[in-house]
Image (cartoon, grey):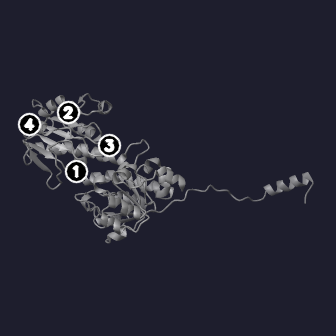
Amino acid sequence: MITDPEALKSLIKEGSLLPQEEMLAIGRKKGKLVIGIPRETTYQENRVALTPEAVQFLVSNGHQILVETKAGESARYGDHDYSEAGAEISYDKAEVFKANIIIKVAPPSDEEIELMPGNQTLISALQLTLHPKKTLVALMNKKITAIAWDYIQDEHQIFPVVRAMGEIAGNTSILIAAELLSNYKTGKGIMMGGVAGVQPTEVLILGAGTVGEYACRAAMGLGASVKVFDNSISKLRRLQNDIGHRIFTSVIQPKILEKAIMRADVVIGAVRAPFGRTPCIVSEEMVKTMKAGSVIVDVSIDQGGCFETSRVTNHTKPTFVEHDVIHYCVPNVASRVSRTASIALSNIFSPMLLEMGEMGGCKEMIKRDPGFRSGVYIYKGKLTSEILGKVFDLPFKNIELLLAAL
């Protein structure tokens, strides 16, 4: 044993000159994702969750993509496009549903849930009307982690998918109205907008949210005279500020609304309810006062519609005439422009999936990303949505408490 202090210092100095182990930072373990993209089976759902370009982006980053044959057919993407992008084309639906992560547009059907072996991640829309209690129970029994893409938030606490689909629906609603005003089928031959010496078309928009804003932009771009009604003064103020143009705005006062509807050539229903059914704003008596040949496009039909005369139609037979007014009441307007909508979805999903892989998987992303976590409604078989729990009388647990317990 060395007791001399000087000798001990000398020994320590010599030891410090010896080769030392290099201390490297321990990086986060990246995960290889196996992603399944099934073909949509919901009636007239024409969108696909990932385009071939997005698939190529993910495959080049080391992830495996299984695409069911003809999954992109309705969006005009063929199997060859996906295989060239590096995806594996599966002719067996069951193989696609064995993937660790399943991403689709519409909620899963009972048959699709039956194909899932369990302990997987499902990313799809959450539509209460298509999510009966037995569907939730089936997902819970299979220990699925289910994420609603319409409830995922970005860093600015905006719902990016809902906003993107709202922008598409708003623009498309005006293009649909323009087509129906022309001599197409029962139209009275009016051009949307106006030319010198001809009174411009009058467009009335109910709702100043994303759909209403982009409908307003499209109508103004075509030269129409636009009026916007909403019960939120702050939304109306934001709309005027974002558009940068003073337009007619009003809160929903029955007398003012009735007069505006009488003069309108086009009425767009763009009201969105946070939960449940949209309020019925336009009565049948108001519709009776509208000009013959005028057009109603009820984008709110997804949540029940805001016109008393609305009834659900489809992309095959999209219109009906009631009180000499043409009604267009097709849910899921974005499927009418499925390729554009699919690209918009891919622009959101592909960076999200890439980040998930960088973090090491879905579990880590749920822990680290509060915006992504807000979309979780089932976590490893446990219901985490208070709304669904109360609607279907099912036990639920707070996602934050579940994660804290792990």
CA neighbours of label 1 inside 10 A, class few (<14), some (14 to 19), many (20+): many
Give the residue pinned by disc 4. Answer: 291
Please report contact status of discs 1 and 3: CB closer than 8 Å, yes or no. Answer: no
Give the residue pinned by disc 3. Answer: 274
Distance, label 1 to label 4, CA atoms, is: 25 Å
Q: Residue at x 47, y 49 (%)?
A: 369
Q: Secondary structure at mark 3?
A: loop
Residue 386: % across, % down: 40, 49
Residue type at mark 2? Val
Residue 171 horizontal side relative to residue 108, left or right: left
Residue type at mark 4? Lys
Residue type at mark 3? Pro
In the image, farthest residue toward the bottom: 92
In the image, farthest residue toward the front: 393
Figure check: 83 above or below 306: below
The quarter holding residue 172 reads top left
Residue 214: % across, % down: 26, 40
Residue 9 horizontal side relative to residue 91, left or right: right
Q: Residue at x 17, y 29 (%)?
A: 255
Numbered badge on residue 331:
1
Q: Residue at x 48, y 59 (%)?
A: 361
Q: Earlier in the sequence, mark 4 or mark 2?
A: 2
Q: Nearer the viewer, residue 383 or 261?
A: 383
Distance, label 4 to label 2, CA atoms, is: 17 Å
Numbered badge on residue 226:
2
